[in-house]
Image: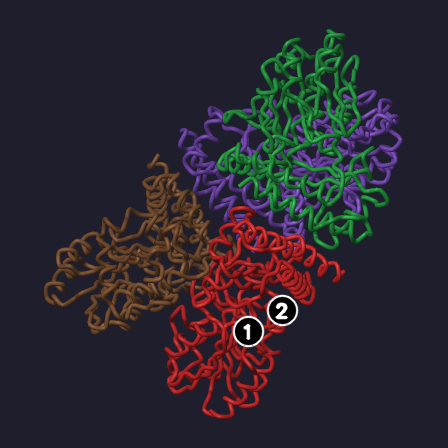
Chain colours: A red, B brown, C purple, D green
Amino acid sequence: MRFTGYIGEIGQAAAAALIGGDDVVLNLASGEYGKGFGFWAARHCRELLEIEVPYDDAIDSEAVGEMLAARPDIRILSVCHHDTPSGTVNPVREIGALCRERDVLTIVDAVSSFGGMDIHPEDVNADIFVTSPSKCLGGSTGISIVHVSERAWAKIDANPAAPTASVLSLKDWRDAWRSDVLFPFTPSVSEVHALDAAVQNYLDEGPEAVWARHALTARACRAGVRALGLDLWPARDAICADTATTVRVPEGLEDEAIRREARGRYGVVFSAGRGSLMGKLVRIGHMGPVARPIYAVVAVSALGGAIAALGGKADVGAGVEAALAVIDGAG
Amino acid sequence: MRFTGYIGEIGQAAAAALIGGDDVVLNLASGEYGKGFGFWAARHCRELLEIEVPYDDAIDSEAVGEMLAARPDIRILSVCHHDTPSGTVNPVREIGALCRERDVLTIVDAVSSFGGMDIHPEDVNADIFVTSPSKCLGGSTGISIVHVSERAWAKIDANPAAPTASVLSLKDWRDAWRSDVLFPFTPSVSEVHALDAAVQNYLDEGPEAVWARHALTARACRAGVRALGLDLWPARDAICADTATTVRVPEGLEDEAIRREARGRYGVVFSAGRGSLMGKLVRIGHMGPVARPIYAVVAVSALGGAIAALGGKADVGAGVEAALAVIDGAG
Amino acid sequence: MRFTGYIGEIGQAAAAALIGGDDVVLNLASGEYGKGFGFWAARHCRELLEIEVPYDDAIDSEAVGEMLAARPDIRILSVCHHDTPSGTVNPVREIGALCRERDVLTIVDAVSSFGGMDIHPEDVNADIFVTSPSKCLGGSTGISIVHVSERAWAKIDANPAAPTASVLSLKDWRDAWRSDVLFPFTPSVSEVHALDAAVQNYLDEGPEAVWARHALTARACRAGVRALGLDLWPARDAICADTATTVRVPEGLEDEAIRREARGRYGVVFSAGRGSLMGKLVRIGHMGPVARPIYAVVAVSALGGAIAALGGKADVGAGVEAALAVIDGAG
Amino acid sequence: MRFTGYIGEIGQAAAAALIGGDDVVLNLASGEYGKGFGFWAARHCRELLEIEVPYDDAIDSEAVGEMLAARPDIRILSVCHHDTPSGTVNPVREIGALCRERDVLTIVDAVSSFGGMDIHPEDVNADIFVTSPSKCLGGSTGISIVHVSERAWAKIDANPAAPTASVLSLKDWRDAWRSDVLFPFTPSVSEVHALDAAVQNYLDEGPEAVWARHALTARACRAGVRALGLDLWPARDAICADTATTVRVPEGLEDEAIRREARGRYGVVFSAGRGSLMGKLVRIGHMGPVARPIYAVVAVSALGGAIAALGGKADVGAGVEAALAVIDGAG
């Protein structure tokens, strides 16, 4: 199902459709985006439970299993696969399997991982799976992609609070993918064509090749960042995303200054942290067209150059060589 | 203010932001779209009043004045300028003046008239004025345009129920037009550029010239339709829109068949009625790129040809000559 | 073979490549474009022969047979399929067969017929077949399409005067269609993509469907023009092109005034005659996106309206009805 | 004057228009492109003189002055500003001044320097000045830009051999820039719009800023290449172009292997030498969108990485640091 709306919109729509007034929801928060979903969920549910971990860490699937066992009234679980502001990934496959065992419905936010990593709705037992062509598919931003399982549709149909006749209504979009059914609202025609083009490019290149391209770029970037003498934000390598690299701001420097220097000197744009992470890290995206290994070299050069320009310590030569070594090793 | 969302979305957002739980709202319904706004309004207000007229007619501003006098607790009035499915226009200038006298806030839907007719928020005392680049400006469909008056912002600020952190939140977009303020959601970049291009084209051609182009096309179309031997849907000429012509389906024919023949034989697409008007009329749009007089000839030819093909009566030659006569007279 | 250059360019290139200093060339002139090719041919050949007919007529293939018999030293024959300024077509199939019998090489200009009528290089025994995506394929104007037979390549290879290292050199382009061969000059990348898109659209719609669309549009237009009370330019129906309709300027009117009125009043652009035909006729194109029957109605309306506006006689109602009758009859 | 054709085309057209059968032409050859122009010139002139220098060097303006003094019958001088395959620039300002003193007409090829360096027709006394939007302006490739001085038009008018009615005819294009004059051939409409956009971008950014951007990128690249431990191709810094950097292929390596590794490993495309320079050097372009300093870092990284991968010596860390130091110094 295509949903012609914004990423935020589709998350809200998912919460509004699936979550009824009697439902207990378990929201997993390992970062700002996961945490944020809880606020939307809370608008609709009877009780919101959360497992929250520090935002440089990932959810532990064992803890999820224990919570599900302790609270068999949990009806819906929500989780972010890649919590973008943190650059960390959660074990959604394991979590999805646990939920399926207990008949818990899941809402999975894969906005910034689908298309760049090996994740599909069925693999992770997602009941509502939300993503966007604008991230790893390199597409446009005005449309979302959402998968809704038959189990989720049954729940939505049974939910008297599920919106209709609203832009926040998943139900209105249920059959809009059919060629003989009208869109519920005037569609953004150019966005629909852009989505088709993005998906076609993805299939033409081959999903495995696209994932490998994202992974190699991220590995080269991480190696380069470390060789610069900097620290990655995630607590350990195993939870680092392939679609973004987050770097801890060195002692004595300010993230805004680093981003300003990188942009001003080299034309390279890094992202800031969000919410509670603001000021603590700098983010390097590897999604879509910039998920190419040479961009890791660009990022490492610009990051190192910016830090050096601010009087910080960064061994740019070593950083670039380390990134190149990873790329060369992949040949 | 630009609002990166759909037309329906912005109407809902306007209702949600402006209408508080204590408000009495007067909704004016002269067609399906005006009527439809009432349903959104009813979700938020204490009491919904309506003035409703047959859908081939327009609201009488005197009746509005009387209602405002009778119910001084009316806080908000909502009205559709051009009720698209009917092809009729309401006297929003007069209605706006009445509201201003009594300090009633107005929500004006000018989606399918702004850019094609002489209407601007200030002229009609609109407090929330909703439109789209996708209609008369010939632009794209994925973005809306909304004007919010200072009085409306004050009301919204005072409304505890006004949404925030939602795609339905006008408040989130309040400062998004400023170059130093981020959009509340990832914007559809191509839609923003498309809006700018559409507005630039409008200004380059000159608003007065654009309105005249719409008006001449509509006049030629109405003359042609009548000379075909058909009846216009609106009860009288004074309430016919310059941006769409609606034609009563002749006795003994079906609107769907007419539309099918026009499309199949001539590649000309007419619109159907909506809701209660379905089957009663056929709609000919004159908006943006098709608001050129020669398209009136195209429409009259195709409408007449389709009706004739179905065994109905339509004097195509007379219809085309009448349309051309209007065009020639405008030289 | 794709040739990244202009239509005129490719005609010149064909002449320069194929025609040697010892060659006798028979050029067939039934219009300005056929005649014009003779000037290019004359730059290269030993002797230029011509069969010329009035420009409202077409070449008689019998006369060609007689000339080939009388002058067995003719080595190359050049002919325009659709002589655009006249709106007439020549019997290139028959002429091609005659040439093949006598081993005469042919240069066929199918610029404004290929893609809109049933003509392919092999069918007409064309040795050099020149066309463009910008006419009936509805594509872009900065690139040409040329077919060169093996026999023609052998002749070009044996021609010491065939240009190389020049934009006028067919030889430089010989292998440029191969993915492992560079273009001889920096290609216009956007034009190459535009060509691919135009050809893809043509194949998707289906060549037979595209030809039928052109033919129906032309038939409707001719019927409409006659019912207006005007005369077609071609001497008889059998030689009228399906891709353009040419109309004799009525006594007492000026073509420029007709075109000015049609453009000014209705936004409909007609073409003028060329060279000796200037002032004698008005041209209505039916190529690519405007080769749709309803455009015949548009053309007939605008032509009739313009003539009437100038005080001429034109029965617009009858014209439109006649055009519609042809379209309806095709259902 | 815009010339809707290819770069090679316009050079040929300039030679054909300006050079008459009685003319003595002095062609300056400091590279393959300058040398190549001589072949075109030789097709038209009575006598072709040349000053040729090794292709890693530039023309000496004193030598030009001496030649002009020795052969007062020289009527036309031709020179390439930036001989692209060599990455070297000639002192066209000085040469132009010498020519003006002696009333010698000049043909200046500024294809790969205009828009990226400070050169304009008037500054260098160019009588025919040829360039393209596709290089430093970052535009499209299917159109050329040519300036023709009044003196050159007088010469062309007096040249009976100047082509007309040909795609190689400058004369046909003389007035095509006027809004009331038709193009001599069907124009490539998209190319014309693309040219306008490219020029507008150039003017919006500001020519001086664009030149500075090209110059800084080239300086950073040269510093990086040297720090890698490689040799620049040009004999000395003063003649290095700001729009391309050419690097001598290290002993024991092959240019094709270097280019293959750079493309395969990093997705970075270098150009080969041309003609006699093939195999001797690798070219890094700095034109239009890639004329941004960070691309110097990309080029140095990829070049160093490729050479290292082939077993050559290249200090990538030092190279990148040197490039960054130049960029930082420019702040």
Q: Secondary structure at mark 2?
A: loop
Q: Nearer the viewer, residue A128 or C93?
A: A128
Q: Nearer the viewer, residue C276 or B89?
A: B89
Please provide percent x and percent y for residue D327. Answer: 59, 43
Which chain does the residue under circle 1 lie in? A
Q: Quadrant of the C terminus of chain A?
A: bottom right
Answer with the quarter of the image where residue C25 lies.
top right
Horizontal and vertical percent position of residue C212:
63, 50
Please give the residue where the numbered disc 2 appears in the rendered image.
Answer: A117
Q: Residue at x 19, y 69 (%)?
A: B24
Q: Amino acid at mark 2?
A: Met
- The correct choice, above or below, for C219 with respect to C13 in the image is below
Q: Quadrant of residue B307?
A: bottom left
Seen in the picture, residue C25 relative to D263 is either above or below; the reply is above
Q: Around disc 2, counting alpha carbons within 10 Å, would you say few (fewer than 14), some (14 to 19), or many (20 or more)? A: many
Q: Say which residue appears at 59% left-offset and 17% top-offset.
A: D149
- Pick whichever of labels 1 and 2 is earlier in the sequence: 1
- The residue type indicated by label 1 comes to His
**Percent of width and height locating residue D248:** 78, 38
Q: Are marks 1 and 2 in contact (CB under 8 Å)?
A: yes
Chain ID, mark 2: A
Tag on residue A81?
1
Is residue D234 found left or right of D325 in the rendered image? right
Q: Secondary structure at mark 1?
A: loop
Res D22 visible: yes
Q: Tell me residue A249's x, y (percent).
A: 52, 61
